[in-house]
Structures are given as C-alpha cells and as structure tokens.
Image (cartoon, helix red, strand yellow):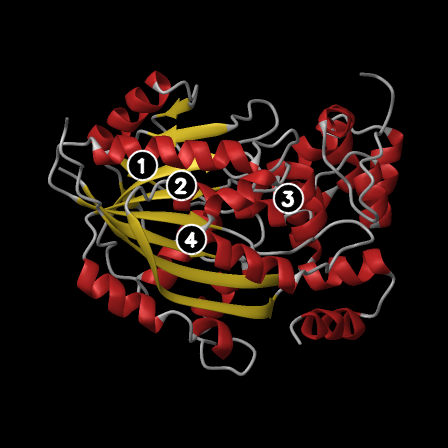
C-alpha cells in the first residue's frame, strides 16, 4: 500500500487513488477551505501563513507558489479541489488545460472545437 | 402508486451557471448547447413531475476526503446550494421529500446497497445547473427532490455495473412507492472530458455517441466496461457517465427516446442531453 504511485496505463492521466488521497490530504483540505470567501481572502493576505496553517509539506507549498497544475497534481492535489485554488487566481479550466498541455489557450480551445468535428 | 415518467440526463459544466447569469444563451458559443433544452421544457410541461430523484456527483461542496460516501441519499426537508469557491451564483433552495427519501433508504438497504443517509446536505452545481436548465427563469422549483450523490472524486469509484444496479434498485423502490406521485429521474454530468494531466482536453465523440445510443435500448452494454475503461475512453472526469447509467437503470418499463442533444465543446466538455420516457409495462397475470 505504500508502494508509491501506481501506473494505471492511461497516458497523461492521473487516477486519484488512495495513495494520492493520503499524500495530498493537507493540500486538498486547504483547497476545500476555499469554498469560504473569508478563507479565500485570508489566503490572499498571506499565502505562506495559510499553507502552514493547513500543514502543507515543502513539495505542496512549492507547487502552490509555482501555480503549476501538474506539480500540484504530483503533490497529491485533486482537480476538483484544485479548481477552487484556480478560481482564486482567476483561471478557468481552459487556462488550466493549456498550462498542463503546454499549449496556448487559443490552441487548446481550437483543439476542443476540433474534437467536435 | 408512484409513476416514473422517465429520465433526463444532462451535462452540468460550471460555466453554464455563468452563461445563465449573464444571459448568454443566444450567443454563438452557447446557442448550440442551450437550444437543446426547449424540447425538454415542452416535455416537462406535459409530463408534470412532482418529484425528481437526482443522481449526481458532489465536487467538494458537501463532501470532503475526510468522509466520502460512495453513494449518499439525501433525507432533508430542504437542500441549499452554496459558494463553491469560483463564483457562480447560487440558486434558490429545493424542497425535499423526506417520506420518499426514507422509503428509498429503507428499500436500498434491504436491497443490499449500504448507502449513507444525509439529513443535511448541500447540493452543488451538478444538481443545481441541470435543474436551472430544465426549469429556467429562477421561479420556485416546481418539483421536490431526492438527491443521490455518487463518488466521482476518489478512486475506487463504483463501477458502471454497480451504478446500473443502484439505479435498478431505485427503480424498484419507486415502483413500490404507494404515493400517487409522478417521478422524474435525473442523471447529471459528462459526457467525455478531462480537466487534469497532460491529456487535459481529451474528448471522445464516438464513445459518447455510442453511450447515448446504448442508453436507450441496450444499457447493459455499458455495464461491461470497468471504471478504468471509462476513464480511458471518456476521460478522467468522464466517469460522470455513471450517473446517466444509474438514471437509466431506474427506468423499469418500456423506454423510448423523446429527445437528445450533443454539442462540443462547453468549457472542456462534450455536452450531452437525453430525455427518455418510461411506460410502465403491465404486470403479467400471476400464474
């Protein structure tokens, strides 16, 4: 059970399993707290202090500071909770998708439209 | 005796809430999506449900990883929406139907579905947006609701087969409910989409269309996929298809397709919509 991240054989896809749920618990708990406007404001006032309050480890604090979604996922972040963090930053899911795929937002949106053709 | 009039399955992409709030329904980006709904309004106007049983997934409003039920049945007199963190407007509260909730709970547990029972439950966009699409305008909701939340956050997720069996158990319970009410079943989410990872933006139109076709006449076909098959074919968040499968499972009669719509993209998602009518099959004469 402690054997690290399993490979589920689906390229470019993270299966948020028990390993990640445990690894990411503090990070996801912090992001879950962003349902509250007061908490979002408190985070914005002092990110570092807020991350410490929720017990994020170094990897998770660095990932939050970097705003790098792939790093946040590697650190155990679940996309449903990370979306609340992205909301604080004013990022929508196309911004998040473009960042993870290394595309411009325009190219990412064009890819989505092409999927419907 | 309760009359299950049919099911509506619909996407619930959060951006829909923003589009409704900003009245963007006729903008070119949104029109092909919103144009799917007037036939739903017409059908609902004729079908006149009293109560809606809604299969959906909570995205971290009511449930967190501290205690995450695989299946949770609401048993509240009222359900409220709340801030989910990224700013879509909240909607009016929904009236519950505690008597039906407890009937479903008792029936499901007797049927070996060990569900979680919730007398307090916030409902997120996955429930509120389809309702706002079915009954636009912001007036009081014309139906009472029984929410049934399914885990789509934390693997292991329930399998397609389990989702279908859950739906069938709900269908049996509804058929046995002795109140004279008209019941709409709702399944929300999907279709194919993936928000996270290097495969973000993944959409699978052929798979979605196959699923929409199978849901009408051959839903058992979808139960042969594993959960990971659905992740692979429909994307990491495409597992929300399971709510559609559960809703279809709850229709125990003769099912016909009334209406469907499919549009790519809204946000990062292939959106789908189906209206399925359910005609009770007369019981065969007991021998």
Q: Residue furthest front?
A: B287
Q: CA distance from mark 3 to mark 1?
A: 30 Å
* Residue A114 image offset from top left, x and y in percent: 71, 74
Q: Nearer the viewer, residue B266 or B160?
A: B160
> Circle 3 is placed at which residue position?
A80
| Residue B12 appears in the figure | no
Which chain does the numbered disc 2 sit on?
B
Which chain does the numbered disc 4 sit on?
B
Which residue is found at the position 40% from the left and 44% from the top?
B247
Picture quarter containing residue A5? top right
Numbered tag placed on residue B171 in the rendering:
1
Q: CA distance from mark 2 to mark 4?
A: 11 Å
* Residue B195 image offset from top left, x and y in percent: 70, 53
**Number of the front mark, 3 or 1:** 1
Which chain does the numbered disc 3 sit on?
A
> Circle 4 is placed at which residue position?
B217
**Number of the front mark, 3 or 2:** 2
Numbered tag placed on residue B249 in the rendering:
2
- Secondary element at tag 1: helix
Tell me if label 4 and label 1 are in contact, CB under 8 Å. Answer: no
Question: Which image quarter holds the C terminus of chain B?
Answer: top left
Tell me if label 2 and label 1 are in contact, CB under 8 Å. Answer: yes
* Residue B8 image offset from top left, x and y in percent: 37, 55
Badge 2 crowding class, 10 Å Cα cut-off, few under 14, some 14 to 19, many 20 or more, is many
- Secondary element at tag 4: helix
Tell me if label 3 and label 2 are in contact, CB under 8 Å. Answer: no
Q: Nearer the viewer, residue B111 or B200?
A: B111
Pointers 3 and 2 within a single chain: no
**Number of the front mark, 3 or 4:** 4
Badge 3 crowding class, 10 Å Cα cut-off, few under 14, some 14 to 19, many 20 or more, is many
Residue B93 left/right relative to B265: left
């Amino acid at each position: 059970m402690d054997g690290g991240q399993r490979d589920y054989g689906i390229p470019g896809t993270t299966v948020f399993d028990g390993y990640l749920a445990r690894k990411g618990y503090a990070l996801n708990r912090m992001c879950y707290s962003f349902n509250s406007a007061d908490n979002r404001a408190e985070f914005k006032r002092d990110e570092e202090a807020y991350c410490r309050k929720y017990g994020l480890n170094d990897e998770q604090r660095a990932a939050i500071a970097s705003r790098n979604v792939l790093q946040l996922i590697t650190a155990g972040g679940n996309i449903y909770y990370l979306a609340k963090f992205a909301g604080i930053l004013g990022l929508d899911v196309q911004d998040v998708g473009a960042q993870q795929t290394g595309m411009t937002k325009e190219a990412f949106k064009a890819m989505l439209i092409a999927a419907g053709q | 005796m309760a009359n299950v009039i049919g099911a509506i399955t619909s996407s619930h992409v959060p951006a829909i809430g923003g589009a409704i709030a900003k009245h963007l329904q006729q903008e070119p980006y949104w029109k092909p999506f919103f144009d799917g709904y007037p036939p739903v309004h017409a059908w609902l106007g004729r079908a006149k449900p009293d109560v809606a049983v809604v299969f959906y997934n909570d995205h971290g409003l009511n449930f967190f990883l501290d205690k995450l039920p695989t299946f949770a049945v609401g048993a509240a007199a009222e359900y409220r929406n709340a801030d989910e963190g990224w700013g879509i407007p909240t909607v009016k509260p929904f009236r519950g139907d505690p008597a039906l909730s407890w009937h479903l709970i008792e029936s499901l547990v007797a049927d070996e579905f060990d569900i979680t029972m919730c007398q307090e439950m916030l409902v997120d966009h996955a429930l509120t947006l389809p309702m706002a699409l079915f009954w636009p305008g912001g007036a009081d909701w014309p139906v009472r609701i029984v929410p049934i939340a399914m885990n789509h956050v934390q693997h292991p997720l329930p399998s397609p087969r389990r989702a279908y069996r859950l739906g069938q158990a709900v269908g049996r319970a509804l058929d046995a409910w002795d109140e004279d009410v008209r019941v709409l079943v709702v399944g929300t989410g999907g279709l194919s989409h993936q928000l996270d990872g290097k495969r973000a933006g993944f959409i699978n139109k052929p798979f979605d269309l196959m699923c929409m076709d199978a849901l009408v006449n051959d839903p058992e076909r979808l139960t042969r996929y594993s959960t990971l098959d659905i992740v692979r074919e429909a994307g990491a968040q495409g597992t929300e298809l399971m709510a559609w499968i559960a809703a279809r499972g709850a229709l125990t009669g003769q099912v016909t397709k009334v209406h469907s719509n499919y549009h790519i993209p809204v946000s990062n998602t292939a959106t789908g919509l189906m209206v399925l009518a359910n005609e009770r099959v007369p019981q065969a004469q007991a021998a």
